Amino acid sequence: MKTLLTYRGINALAESFNGLYKTELIHRKGPWRNVEHVEWATLNYVDWFNNRRIHESLDYVPPVEFETAYYDSSESESLPVLETI
């Protein structure tokens, strides 16, 4: 049975990420000179978070590597192939 995220689930996920963002970046790396420095640091943080951070529940592999391996696995072999007309 697939679980659908409810509004509460999505809100909890967003609050969790926002808390990490504030703890790991805003409070730890501040004080900030201006808004542009915060924006640039945020872009770098999101890039790191999505592409390079080591994630325990993904067998200590960065998310982008895990996703690549997933799509390269047998899952992609079972996808239907569209015939060209």
Image: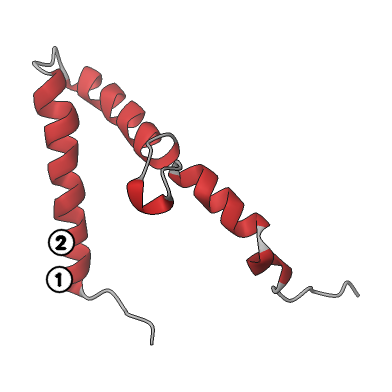
What residue is shown with label 1? 8
Nearer the observer, 39 or 77: 77
2 left or right, relative to 35 = right
The image quarter in which residue 4 lies: bottom left
Q: Is residue 35 above or below residue 21?
A: above
Q: Residue at 24%, 20% (x, y): give it.
A: 36
Q: Residue at 14%, 28% (x, y): give it.
A: 26
1 left or right, relative to 16 = right
What residue is shown with label 2? 12
Residue at the outermost top position: 33
Query: Which type of secondary structure does the marked residue at label 1 adopt?
Result: helix
- Asked whether the residues under the numbered discs 1 and 2 touch, taking CB atoms below 8 Å apart as contact, a structural biologist would say yes
Residue 56 spot, x, y in % from top left: 34, 47
Badge 2, how many Cα within 10 Å: few under 14, some, many 20+? few
Residue at the outermost front position: 59
Q: Residue at 53%, 44% (x, y): give it.
A: 65
Q: Is residue 21 above or below residue 79?
A: above
Residue at the outermost bottom position: 1
Q: Is residue 29 above or below residue 78?
A: above
Q: Is residue 39 above or below residue 34?
A: below
The image quarter in which residue 9 lies: bottom left
User: What is the CA distance from the residue labelled 1 to the residue labelled 2?
Assistant: 6 Å
51 left or right, relative to 80 = left
83 left or right, relative to 35 = right
Q: Residue at 16%, 45% (x, y): give it.
A: 18
